[in-house]
Image (spheres, rainbow, N blue to C red):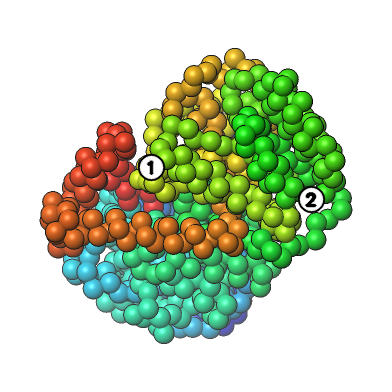
Amino acid sequence: MRFVTDEVNRLGIFFFYDKDGVVDDYVDTLLDGLQPHFSELTIVVNGKLNAKGREKFLSRTNNLIVRENKGLDAWAYKTALDSYGWEKLAAFDEIVLFNATIMGPVYPFSEMFSAMNQRDLDFWGITKFHKVPTDPFGRSPYGYLPEHIQSHFHAYRKSLHTSQAFRDYWDNLPAIKDYFDSVGLHESLFTKRFADQGFKWDVYVNTDDLEGFSYGPITYAAKKLIAEKRCPIFKRRSFFHDYQDVMTQAVGNAALDLYEYLRDYTDYDTDLIWQNALRTMNMADLMKNLHLDYVLPQSVGTPIPNNKRIALIIHVYYMDLLDKTIEYITAMPEGCDIIITVGSKHNMQLVKERCAGLPYHIDVRLIENRGRDVSALLIGGGKDLMQYDYVCFAHDKKVTQLSPQSIGDGFAYKCFENILASKEYVSNVIALFENNPRLGIAMPTPPNHADYFPGYTFPWGPNYVGTKKILSDLGFKDIPLDVTKEPVAPMGTMFWFRPEAFHGLLDREWKYSDFPPEPNKVDGTMLHFIERAYGYVPQGNGYYSAYIFSDRFARIEITNLSYELREMTKSITDPWIRPTLYQTTQAVLEGKRFRNTLLRIIKNIVKRTPVIGPTLVKAHAHQLELKGNDR
């Protein structure tokens, strides 16, 4: 069946789900692009819908269904179809089912509808998933996953939707309890079922040339589909995809390629992506998929706009480190404000004397010796910092409990060299903020050398619950934290930030009594909760967090990470070094009960490194139980 005219009586059925019932602007943009092609629109929502979201949807249609969050998209579509009944549906030339897992349009949908109207088809979609020779879900009657139209957009013409076969399919749709059921019992089988009965199908974006390259080109070749095949949509999941799956199938470039192409070569407003991503996605997932780490030159700079207000706030405690501290201070642009906090009048006088003559506006402030660097920032600087465009926060650092002390000195070196490496480097950090208006905080990565490894790998420690509570107390109750995913935070509490991104933290009335007295515990106090909250308060304010490296230190970091990965892999896989771990790894390779095997590997690593503690095993056990439940 083809349409000889663009005047098509077309019903659009839009499925929407958001755990908080929020309708972000990308949804409006998607519907703005598609709705002109529908004679009628029905919206079906699983779960809740807030008042603003309800108002948005009702401004488009009176056909709004809000139902229990059961059956995922398949049963939402069935509910909408049932609300019409087959007799009424027969009046439509075409029925389109689509959902909020896609974003667009990158190109006008009119191009797509015009092209597909000319094709003699019974049903069609935008993209397809290629044949998978196995059945990972254990649901397929074929023993494999057939190639199929992806369920984010299905279009059924009258020749199909008035058939008894089609009606029987939806009248007898099996229960869909989770993602595996949805793909294994519905999405992957639908296309073949009706193709085998003689119904003709096709997709708008032909990816036959990518057969063998990827099962899901919309994920792993997204840029190619948009740049070369004028695909009008892309998947929201691209930006929070499970990175284990990413690394299994590719080198990790797909989401970054997609985002940068959209930003630089299309009219699609990428701020729509950030609005939704920062509200709903875990920062660790965004960090990995979008590679939110930047390597900046430290010998070639970028001009700094004259109208920008820039400050450094730095806490000085160790007078024997003052010369080195001042050396880093002089990396700041001349003429900017330098706020120096100290814990005694004696130190205050020393700092004033040593900083006299520096080409800055120097403000030395006396603070109480309680709360360490955290109170230095939040009380010593506090609301005063909200007047600036960009602020760097630093403090001198000496980890005295480590032996040799070069271990702690290495941590301090890593922090300073990646925030204040040189004047040129600082100018490039400021340019980074200027060029990325959603960037809220830029920081060095956590330490990963000596005694900091393998604690670097699991740095929540005893701080997850406390961090979540402090964020909630600050008014950020809905930030998507996850104890099984690494925190994205400045573990050395040195960083650059945009004060606007720190609303709720900087402009709160802090007291010294909010912080623990000295001597302080090593971990699990308010200081450590706030240290991790620094990475998430920006997200609550609509900004993302990023890691930054000077180009020189990046050379060191790459070497260190490569060495640690190689040595850890050897310790797991070399039978002469770790026979127990070798056996469990072999079991993984042979496919024997992956989850239990991985847990045994984790437990064995924990036994050899008791610093991690039993909390880790529980957390990862919980992760393995939940993995895969989120569509």
| The N terminus: image quadrant | bottom left
Q: Nearer the viewer, residue 24 or 45?
A: 24
Residue at figure coordinates x 22%, y 56% from the top left: 572
Dot 2 crowding, Cα within 10 Å, few <14, some 14–19, many 20+: some
Horizontal relation, residue 79 to residue 272: left or right: left
Q: Quadrant of residue 586?
A: bottom left
**Residue 85: percent from the left, percent from the top?**
42, 54
Residue 507 visible in the snapshot: no
- SS under mark 2: loop
- SS under mark 1: helix
Pointer 2 residue? 333
Pointer 1 residue? 451
Horizontal relation, residue 592 to residue 179: left or right: left
Q: Amino acid at mark 2?
A: Pro
Residue at figure coordinates x 65%, y 63% from the top left: 297
Q: CA distance from mark 1 to mark 2?
A: 35 Å
**Residue 338: percent from the left, percent from the top?**
77, 38
